Amino acid sequence: MTLLLVAAVALIDVEGRVLLAERPAGKSLAGLWEFPGGKVEPDETPEAALIRELHEELGIETWQSCLAPLSFASHAYADFHLLMPLFACRKWGGIAHAREGQRLAWVRAADLRNYPMPAADLPLIPILRDWL
């Protein structure tokens, strides 16, 4: 089974809300909400992947020093196994806006369960709820 490394981030605003992005139509798991991030490319660190993905997807800039490892998800899908480190980030430059047609939502940790998410993301919810 192929191992897929994907980095994700819990962007946390000054009110303690977490940013979720809805997977757009045409992509796998379309309509589900997830933490921003993406695939880690060859010869790229998870932190570098997040910095790149946050710029591409949301138009914001952050720095490796602002990405704190928080937890990770390990989940077997039908045709690959996902390993997803989750970082927390409270500092970035710019205003997050959808650059790839996705919807965005700032969500309180207690309300994360109200958003349908991919199976791999679900175990991360209690960790965020307890941490925030």
Image (cartoon, rainbow, N blue to C red):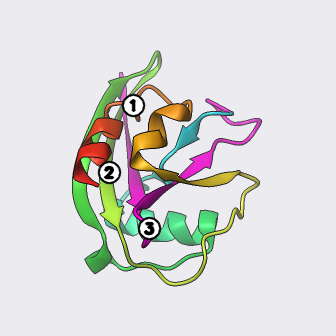
Closest to the observer, 63 or 48:
63
Q: Which residues are magenta?
A: 1-30
Q: Could you tell me which residue is drawn at 39 percent across and 78 percent down?
A: 91
- Structural distance between the alpha carbons of marks 2 and 3: 20 Å
What residue type is disc 1 on?
Answer: Leu
Q: Which residue is mark 3?
A: 15
* Quarter the N terminus occupies: top left
Q: Which residue is mark 2?
A: 86
Q: For the residue labelled by badge 2, is the local secondary structure a helix, a strand or a loop?
A: strand
Q: Position of residue 46 (x, y in %)?
A: 33, 59
Between label 3 and label 1, give the one nearer the viewer.
3
Q: For the residue labelled by badge 3, is the local secondary structure a helix, a strand or a loop?
A: loop
One can see residue 117 in this view: no
Verify CB contact (< 8 Å) between mark 3 and mark 1.
no
Q: Could you tell me which residue is drawn at 23 percent across and 45 percent down?
A: 130
Quarter of the view holding residue 28: top right
Between label 2 and label 3, give the one nearer the viewer.
3
Quarter of the view holding residue 62: bottom left
Q: Position of residue 57 (x, y in %)?
A: 62, 63
- Structural distance between the alpha carbons of marks 3 and 1: 22 Å
Quarter of the view holding residue 104: bottom right
Left or right: 85 in relation to 36: left
